[in-house]
Image: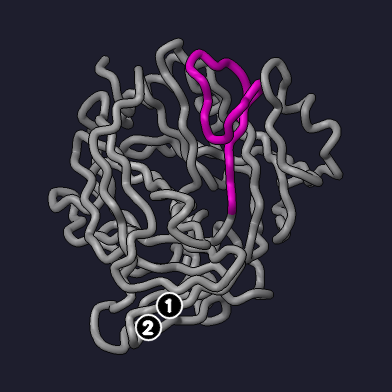
Amino acid sequence: MRHGILPRQDIEQLVKTGAITGLSEDHAHPPSIQPASLDLCLGDTALRLRASFLPGPGLSVAAAMDSVVMHRIDLTGGAVLETGCVYVIPLKEGLNLPEDIVGLANPKSSTGRLDVFTRVICDGGEKFDTIPAGYSGPLYMEVAPRTFPILVRPGDRLGQIRFRCGVHQPLETQHVSIDLEGTHAGAVIGYRAKRHSGLVDLRGLKGHAATEYWEPLYAPNGTLVLDPEEFYILASREAVEIPIMQAAEMAPIAPEIGEFRAHYAGFFDPGFGAVEAGGRGSRAVLEVRGRDVPFLLRHGQAVAKLVFEPMAETPDILYGAQGSHYQSQGLRLSKHFDSTA
């Protein structure tokens, strides 16, 4: 096996050999394997915390949580996770990783577009979203809704995990800039989330009126002021294409570029935006949150970067080849909302 990100068929082998546990016996939630990642399923219980944490070397997540757990919530009949709260949810998946494979987690696209902050942690973990090579044990997801309360149930998928064999081998970096002109004069160039909206049912696809949750934005002079602690959906000026033998991740350019964050959900699978997968002209949709002080964005301003790395093998399916809400996308809200915004 070459070094690089494992494709779908190799992840399937990890499931079959027991390197990924908790899936083969769960017939209600069969594995959802993407071209270069595995969707992670929430378990049956959420634990409301008073603070986020990392367990650190030699300490399990369960033991580290003892001092910060406030109460437990049964998810089996559905439960609402409130904004401004931090929860940890044991995941259905566990890992028995080989010594040369690392796990890398990230929120799913729809999760980021709902402004739900998620991070994966493991026993002995010193970093969020990074599972060390050779790890054997359970996985947990920290979930913190920022703008909308969410209705969740066991088996819901808020995050995803990639597997890298061997050393990290970044190939190239592509800067991503903001589109504040849109498709024509007077076009909507983004959306700002409305505070104090109703809850979002994670299984209610296209079941929420976009106008009740989002305010359309315009930028007639090519600029937009980000208000502190407000959440925005914007689009990249550039079309993005991920080659068949590469995967990419959105990352910050540098902390000194301004008072905002623009890369909540960062995985891009092989075939995103690729012509052969029906994705000509796909844009990156950016989840942007203002920080501290108002900040003026200009059309074409670089706000993030895509870091490309090789696939270990050619994936047997490409992103969007079997249909995707986000292939060939321009500016687009998550799949939970109708198209009336």
113 displayed left or right of 155? left
Q: Which of 106 and 33 is in front in this view?
A: 106
How far, Cα to Cα, is label 2 from label 1? 6 Å
Q: Nearer the viewer, residue 190 or 220?
A: 220
Residue 23 numbered mark, or none: none
Q: Are marks 2 and 1 in contact (CB under 8 Å)?
A: yes
Q: x%, y% of residue 239?
A: 22, 60
Q: x%, y% of residue 288?
A: 48, 63
Can you identify the residue that label 1 sits on? 224
Mark closer to the chain start, 2 or 1: 2
Residue at the image position 52 percent from the left and 30 percent from the top: 130
Q: Which of 291 and 134 is in front in this view?
A: 291
Q: Is residue 31 visible?
A: no
Q: Can residue 232 be seen in this view?
A: yes
**Up-down relation of residue 185 to residue 238 (above or below):** below
Amino acid under label 1?
Answer: Leu
Residue at the image position 33 percent from the left and 65 percent from the top: 301
* Residue with the most extreme left position: 276
Q: x%, y% of residue 50?
A: 81, 46
- The quadrant where residue 228 appears: bottom right
**Up-down relation of residue 30 to residue 165 (above or below):** below
Find the magenta span and give its range. Answer: 117-139
- The quadrant where residue 6 appears: top left
Amino acid under label 2?
Answer: Ala
Residue 219 numbered mark, or none: 2
